Image (cartoon, helix red, strand yellow):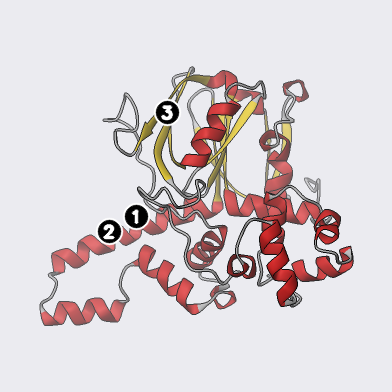
Amino acid sequence: MTSNRLREHRLAAEMTQIEVAEAIKVTQPTYQRWEKGAQVPPAKIKALAKLFNSTEDRLLGVNAPIVAAFYDDTAPTEHQYYGEVSFHFASGGKPLVLSISEEVRVQFSRAMMGSSYFIPIRSLTNQLVAIRRDAIADIYFCSEAHDDYGPEHETYERPSNLQYPDNRDWEIIESIVLDFGETDYDKESLERLKRAICGPPKEVIEQDLASGKVTQEQVDEVKKLVEKNLDEAEKLSLRCVYQLSSGARRELSFESERKMYDAFSDIFDGKYIPTFGARYIQAVPYHHYLFLNPAAVDFISVPTHRYQIGLAAAEAGEDDDDDDDWE
């Protein structure tokens, strides 16, 4: 894993390595080495921050936590919490409610005026969702001021409170869920997210219980909340979810980010053509694969950070082993 976020920012800017290299006056191989983790000279990291409209700390992956901003017009619109959007489907399937930023609200509203078969939307809770245009019955945008999510507010499945706009945070959350790879991240970020998901450390809870600061009932409530948070963290950081037009929901666990990207890239890029019919989707080679007809789903949701890792791998030309291995 590289220690910087250059590739992520370049892809967000829709630039090639050659274009970036030319813009900051270095060779493409030199810039490529930086993306793979080589040290970037101070003058060049400053130039890259200006090019990507970011900060040096964010490019180096050492920035302060990025949070969803509430009532803060000075924050970037991509981080400003707008509220929720609720999708109701013509087939009568379960509505989908997403927490979104101000920027996403504007982007999706504009995209609705287009003609792509699927419309992508990104939530503040690490969901990159492709909504099939013809599956939509109606859509309600509800700002935080209304706080009812839409006309069926009594029955909606509420979105998670794990609102972290930064992909780096979701990489750390994934490592917490899997209990693997935590040493790849800085201690401060790891402890911050562990506390948000898992609550106070066990020894702190035991001390507070012994001193009478908390009751056993309060401890039990914390344990229930932690269990809920871990379940949400696992789904949001690892699982692909799609809803059939029948209303049934399915979950998929992909072995690699590249396989996830390859399965759905044309859908999220707006290039999907329904005449292709069912497609082969390889979640885990040989052990778990399926054929899915995207024209028969209401929506497809993938973890944003994993999809973008897969995009970066594809853009870098990294091959995935065991392609088409169903025998």
User: In the structure shown, which secondary structural element does the residue marked by tag 2 occupy?
Assistant: helix
Q: Is residue 318 visible?
A: no
Amino acid type, label 2: Lys
Amino acid type, label 3: Lys
Q: Which residue is mark 1?
A: 228
From the viewer's perspective, is residue 147 above or below residue 208? above
Marks 3,2: beta carbons within 8 A? no
Q: For the residue carrying disc 1, how many other residues have a C-alpha within 10 Å: few (<14), some (14-19), or many (20+)?
A: some
Marks 1,3: beta carbons within 8 A? no
Frontmost residue, 75 versus 82: 75
- The answer to whether residue 315 is left or right of residue 183 is right
Indicate which disc, 1 or 3, sits on the residue closer to the N terminus. 3
Q: Which residue is mark 3?
A: 94
Amino acid type, label 1: Lys
User: In the structure shown, which secondary structural element does the residue marked by tag 1 occupy?
Assistant: helix
Task: Count every numbered label the image shows and give the total.
Answer: 3
User: In the structure shown, which secondary structural element does the residue marked by tag 3 occupy?
Assistant: loop
Residue found at x 14% / y 64%: 217
Residue found at x 34% / y 59%: 227
Q: Which residue is mark 2?
A: 224
Q: Quadrant of residue 316?
A: bottom right
> What's the CA distance linking mark 1 and mark 3?
21 Å
> What's the CA distance linking mark 2 and mark 1?
6 Å
Q: Quadrant of residue 148?
A: top left
Marks 2,1: beta carbons within 8 A? yes
